[in-house]
Amino acid sequence: MDWSHYSIPAMRREARFGDRVVPAFCERPKNIWAMVSDAALRNPDGEALVCGDRRMTWREVAQQSADVAAGFRRMGLQRGDRIALLLGNRVEFVLAMFGAAHLGLVTVLLSTRQQKPEIAYALSDCGARLLIHEATLSERLPDARDIPDLQYRIPVDDGESASRLFDSTDSAPWHEPADVDEEDTAMILYTSGTTGRPKGAMLAHCNVIHSAMVYEACMALTSADRSIAAVPLGHVTGVIANIMCMARCAGTLIVVAEFKAAEYLKIAARERVTQTLMVPAMYNLCLLQSDFDSYDLRAWRIGGYGGAPMPVATIEKLAVKLPGLKLINAYGSTETTSPSTIMPPELTAAHIDSVGLPCPGAQIIVVDADGHELPRGEIGEIWTHGGSVIRGYWNNPKATAESFTGGFWHSGDLGSIDAGNFVRVFDRQKDMINRGGLKIYSAEVESVLASHPAVVESAIIAKPCPVLGERVHAVIVIRDGSVSGETLRAWCAERLSDYKVPETIDLTAEPLPRNANGKVMKRQLREVWAAAQ
């Protein structure tokens, strides 16, 4: 299977980053600002941003972003300088990012969940000259002596901004945008390193443009689409699948501070939302709302999801309640600028265990421990190549050399590709459980648990065993106290090989710990389990 029956723009093979040759769209914006400027030209009076009571057209977004760029210029910032954003989901996040693109600055995205040492490391590592931050996070900011390169700090709150940077009354004259090359770094996102320090993934303008165009084509997005940002804008899904997608198609981005199912449904109905990208648990939480049927969600046509398999029960409920909603699985990472695979919506139901087909222009292979490509159907590490794959990590040639080979990025995920080109992801290499030589992929067990009506979500982790090496432990979030661990073990035993059935189970009503991208933090669960022993 491929994307030949979709309207995908023409592509050609081009040199990229000096030593790669990748498929790239023949006609494309040169950089992010060119994409924003084009949206303002094509749909000047169309809504671009909605956040609470605030509404902005594409003309206003382009004008105010240029004003922000003028403010950056007055500070003495120049093309290539790094500015850091420690902001939640708000209009200022988008304007700062677009303003940085106008001037050719590199935007460094920080998470509002990061603590002082993590923030200090990122700011120091990238040499940021400016930090724009939530005023409420001032106490979490590092001391000046720890980040000597940082010259400016600008707090932002929900009232009057502490700076004129976002003041649309600024009468500074427009400047021509910087001449930014498409291979220039547009943003740096620090990956949550499993060992050692986080690595600063460098997303170039060409990577961002490529991914935005892939989403636009595969989801058939137009200026009539209205996307709701239910995930943090400061992470790869939010910044690419929400902000940049809407810039590419000149559609509308509805910004919400955080996901709360009850509030989400109200906004989605009021704003006639057409497109979302969320983790499966978010869809489930929406369905659990007692007044779900009272909301008019007929405009909602695309339900993108990733980070975990979508429970069959959730898919079936959505099909009944929202027959016009097309569910689209997607798989990707920061290093692939969001999407590596996308599932054509008409194939979701028939390939429920797959994350989809390689995106247009992407090449995905599965390799063994020695880096040799494996035959179709065999399980190994997933490697990805294409126009969305980043150059490497900021100021870290060692990590870049370890993670990239010939333009392929080593994902660290275990998976397979079948004869029809459908990709399956089973586990992170570090999360695979080895029980006496028998390999257990947590995604398979989690999928079985998700099909039980009392289960909201679950996480399968390994617990050390002096005899077998590792055994299977489950942390399961349940709806109420009406189900026992033994009942759930029996449910698994009817559907899985005996060695895959969780031997111990923790039941909880609390949500699983997730990072800002919505992925379950299994390392934290392992630490909690170990501390309880």
Image (spheres, helix red, strand yellow):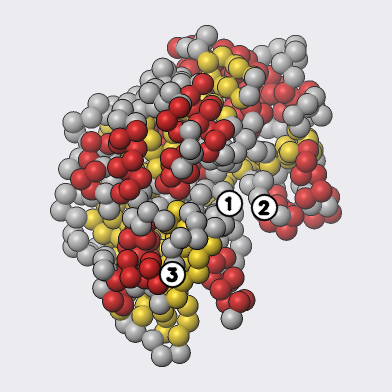
| Image quadrant where one finds the C terminus | bottom right
> Is residue 438 depicted above or below 101 in this figure?
below
- On the image, the x and y values in percent for residue 9 come to 28, 27
**Which callout, 3 or 2, points at the residue further toward the start of the chain?**
2
Q: For the point 62% across and 42% down, which residue is it?
A: 108
Which numbered mark, 1 or 2, is in the foreground of this view?
A: 2
Place residue 197 in its image quadrant.
Answer: bottom right
Q: Distance of mark 1 from mark 3, alpha carbons?
A: 38 Å
**Which callout, 1 or 3, points at the residue further toward the start of the chain?**
1
Q: Label 3's element?
A: helix
Q: Is residue 155 left or right of residue 61?
A: right
Q: Label 1's element?
A: strand
Which numbered mark, 3 or 2, is in the foreground of this view?
A: 3
Reading the image, the residue beneath label 3 is 485
Reading the image, the residue beneath label 2 is 114
Q: Nearer the viewer, residue 481 or 46?
A: 481
Place residue 22 in its image quadrant.
Answer: top left
Q: Amino acid at mark 3?
A: Gly
Residue 190 shows which numbered tag?
Answer: 1
Q: For the point 32% across and 67% down, which residue is it?
A: 492
Q: Nearer the viewer, residue 44 or 82?
A: 44
Furthest residue in direction bottom, as rendered = 467
Furthest residue in direction left, as rendered = 419
**Which callout, 1 or 2, points at the residue further toward the start of the chain?**
2
Q: Label 2's element?
A: loop
Q: Is residue 251 left or right of residue 405?
A: right
Q: Is residue 300 left or right of residue 252?
A: left
- On the image, the x and y values in percent for residue 75 come to 77, 30
| Image quadrant where one finds the N terminus | top left
Q: Distance of mark 3 from mark 2, alpha carbons?
A: 34 Å
- On the image, the x and y values in percent for residue 26 come to 32, 28
